[in-house]
Amino acid sequence: MVGVAAAGSGRPEIVIAGLAGLVAGAMSTGEYVSVSSQTDAEQADIARETHELKETPEAELEERSRIYVGRGLDADWSRARDELGISETVTAHPIQAALVSGKIGLTAFFGDSLPYVCKLKQTHRPPR
């Protein structure tokens, strides 16, 4: 947006550039919420599997064995990784997703609002 203002663009162009920046910030916040929901779902799946393992350990062992053997793997591998597709390296990280996708809400708001404040404070000079 600063580039748009520095290029001597008019107020409508600056407003459009500022709004685009604000939308980008809102999108990163949406990404955070989305990945947080994914994390919640993963944790619920792990809790359900843990409960099932306590309540019906034989059935869970049989299920895990079928999964491992079907993949040609040793049956002693982690059930969370192979039953649920979750491992330490591929779990959802909401903060990381928000940072990677752009900006976090407040940072985006204040960062994208600063040029508006500067433009409003700018003294108007009549054309010569």
Image (spheres, grey):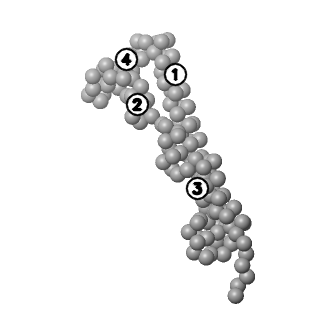
Q: Which residue is mark 1?
A: 47
Q: Quadrant of residue 71?
A: top left
Q: Quadrant of the C terminus?
A: bottom right
The three-letter code of the residue at mark 1 reads Ala
* Element type at mark 4: helix
Closer to the eye: label 3 or 4 = 3
Residue found 49% across the figure and 37% down from its top: 93
> 91 or 95: which is nearer to us?
95
Residue neighbourhood size for the residue with mark 1, other residues' Cα within 10 Å, grouped as few (<14), some (14–19), many (≥20):
few
* Element type at mark 2: loop
Mark 3 or mark 2: name the one nearer the start of the chain: 3
Mark 2 or mark 4: name the one nearer the start of the chain: 4
* Element type at mark 3: helix
As measured in the structure, the alpha-carbon distance from the residue carrying label 3 to the one carrying label 2 is 29 Å
Q: Which residue is mark 2?
A: 88
Give residue 88's position: percent from left, percent from top: 40, 31
As measured in the structure, the alpha-carbon distance from the residue carrying label 1 to the one carrying label 2 is 16 Å
Mark 3 or mark 4: name the one nearer the start of the chain: 3
Residue neighbourhood size for the residue with mark 3, other residues' Cα within 10 Å, grouped as few (<14), some (14–19), many (≥20):
many
Mark 3 or mark 1: name the one nearer the start of the chain: 3
The three-letter code of the residue at mark 3 reads Ala
Q: Are marks 3 and 4 in contact (CB under 8 Å)?
A: no
As measured in the structure, the alpha-carbon distance from the residue carrying label 3 to the one carrying label 4 is 48 Å
Q: Which residue is mark 4?
A: 62
The three-letter code of the residue at mark 4 reads Glu
Residue found 65% across the figure and 59% down from its top: 114
Q: Which residue is mark 3?
A: 24
